Image (spheres, helix red, strand yellow):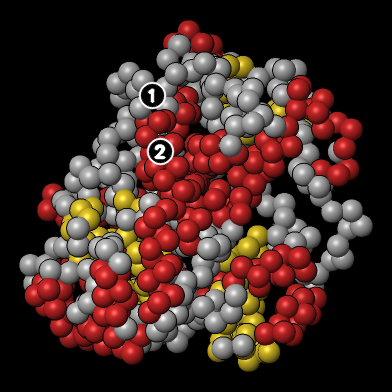
Amino acid sequence: MLRYCPDLYHYQRRKTRVVTVGKVAIGGDNPVRVQSMLTSDTRDTDACVKEALGLVEAGCEIVRVTAQTRVYAANLEHIKAGLLAAGCDVPLVADIHFKPDAAMEAAKWVEKVRINPGNFVDKKKFEVREYSDDQYSDELARIEEAFIPLVHLCQEKSRAMRIGTNHGSLSDRIMNRYGDTPRGMVESALEFARIARSLDYHNFVFSMKASNPKVMIEAYRLLVAELNAQGSDWNYPIHLGVTEAGDGEDGRIKSAIGIGSLLSDGIGDTIRVSLTEDAVYEIPVAQAMAGSIATETARPPLPLVGDSLSYDPFSYTRRASQRVEIQALGLGGGETVRVFNSQATWNAVAHKLKQLGEYQPEILTETSGILAVSPLDETALTALRDRAQPQAITLPDDWPHPIIASYRLLAARVPARHPIVLKDTCFPSTDETRPFLDALLPAATNIGALLCDGIGDAVLIQGEAAPNASLRLAYNILQAAGTRIFKTDYVACPSCGRTLFNLQSTTGKIREATGHLKGVRIAVMGCIVNGPGEMADADFGYVGGAPGKINLYVGKTAVEFNIPEGEAVQRLTELIRSHGKWVEAPAEAAAI
């Protein structure tokens, strides 16, 4: 039986070996390390040094730099020298795609090399073909021939490595055998790990990044379960990240769902929050995320229980509750996941419902008839087991134990017919001046993790006292978890040295033009590295093809090429129109 965590009701940090990246140790008993990535052109030494120093001042512990070609990689020597001259010994990581020779050059100068198994050797062509076992073995031999020299160089120079799979760039060989799946992501990474281990090289970490939090969570769980199955010496550290998370609240929420869910189960030794913003803004989010996990997992643990889970951690299925009607709305039984709110919130927003757009209060908690149940109260649990009619339930306020584990236990001990209302916290806040990030991250982690487990028929935000903000947070968590799509969804990568246009301003223009398209998913990609694959779940894509030129995609198929950047947003809207996905913007936009 696959297991990625010893006990999903009790927090235990996964024990790993220690991997050293220059002066920084990852894994073991070390704290969760915070990383980010330069957005400057790698050939511009002064800009890279300045940006890296700013990241370090903000608290970044490891800095990644793209190295598209050997020429770019060669300048890592000067970036490293510039940092050392400034008295900064922060470890640098070279980000490599497509170019083994760039990896070989980069390993001379930086402390760590990130390789992507999907494109280190393979050139993605989206070919559909069957591989015989002999043909598959031949492909693995080809990979080994290209990868072994880098392993030897890393051993010689005491460099670390990240074997970093991206959902959007799996090789055709993996895609044809395993499909576009978390299992394929895991196998792609293990192929390279087996080669490294055969050479007695162990100074590496894994990552399994995706833009969809559900895919990302499942891939990491499968990876850790597979490492556990391989043996105790496969205890390599894990780097966590949701790739192409986007910007603003949406990017922070999506990152917290994916990263926070895994950290709360003890998985993860280093993290990067990928935002389509200046990289320095990623650092406080990552630090706060690690801090909020530490606070939540420090709560009094549940008593030891022997309950099995009510869900499969490796395959999403929504819990099979039965429908109840509350205040003329259906709850559970396949109905959309509802938003509960307090009477105070309703009173504060009732006069401006039209201005709230999609962010509508739905069910008043105080008059809902919802039943607060302790998963440790056998009398209450027995009554629910005996009750044939479904009853909406939740945890009591002032419940002291960790939220995720407690709702998992409630779902395990109560018949599935009873719908569950998820709270972000059992200690309601009355402080409307509390920093919003302090409410956003634990809410997204706790509720988002449970939604991705298939648990939850409604959500109730209690950690954010401001009425408008609490409603917006509830809906945006549902959107980011893929649970309730009510607005345009954007997959937007963070800037890096490969980016061929200004991602922040361009994403803003695309949002302005398309933000009213409910349920349409648009990918905004700075370059081609992960573009087509990460756009597999998107309806349309806007991808940098060359300096000043944009390629437009429908799904993962390029349909228009080399469009001048100044025309590209208009051409994107025309493409959306031509596929019947366009509607005119409403006269009044949501103001919340």
Q: Disc 2 vs disc 1: which is toward the camera?
A: 2
From this viewpoint, which residue is outermost toward the front? 86
Give the amino acid at mark 1. Arg
From this viewpoint, which residue is outermost toward the top? 379
Q: Name the residue under label 2.
A: 291
Camera-side residue of 62 and 119:
62
Across and down, in percent, residue 361 comes to: 77, 34
Vertical comparison of 541 with 370: above or below = below
Vertical comparison of 384 with 514: above or below = above
Residue 131 seen anywhere in this rendered image of the structure: no
Q: How far apart are marks 2 and 1 (CA)?
A: 13 Å
Vertical comparison of 139 with 28: above or below = below
User: How many circles with numbers are drawn on the protein?
Assistant: 2
| Among the 4 quarters of the image, the one containing residue 543 | bottom right
Across and down, in percent, residue 87 comes to: 27, 63
Vertical comparison of 400 with 93: above or below = above
Q: Mark 1 points at which residue?
A: 299
Element at label 2: helix
Give the amino acid at mark 2. Gly
| Among the 4 quarters of the image, the one containing residue 363 | top right
Q: Quadrant of the C terminus?
A: top right
Q: Which residue is drawn at 48% across and 7% down?
A: 379
Across and down, in percent, residue 318 comes to: 54, 42
Residue 303 seen anywhere in this rendered image of the structure: yes
Residue count near mark 2 (Cα–Cα under 10 Å), binned few <14, some 14–19, many ≥20: some
Across and down, in percent, residue 90 comes to: 28, 62
Could you tell whether 255 is left or right of 193 in the image? right
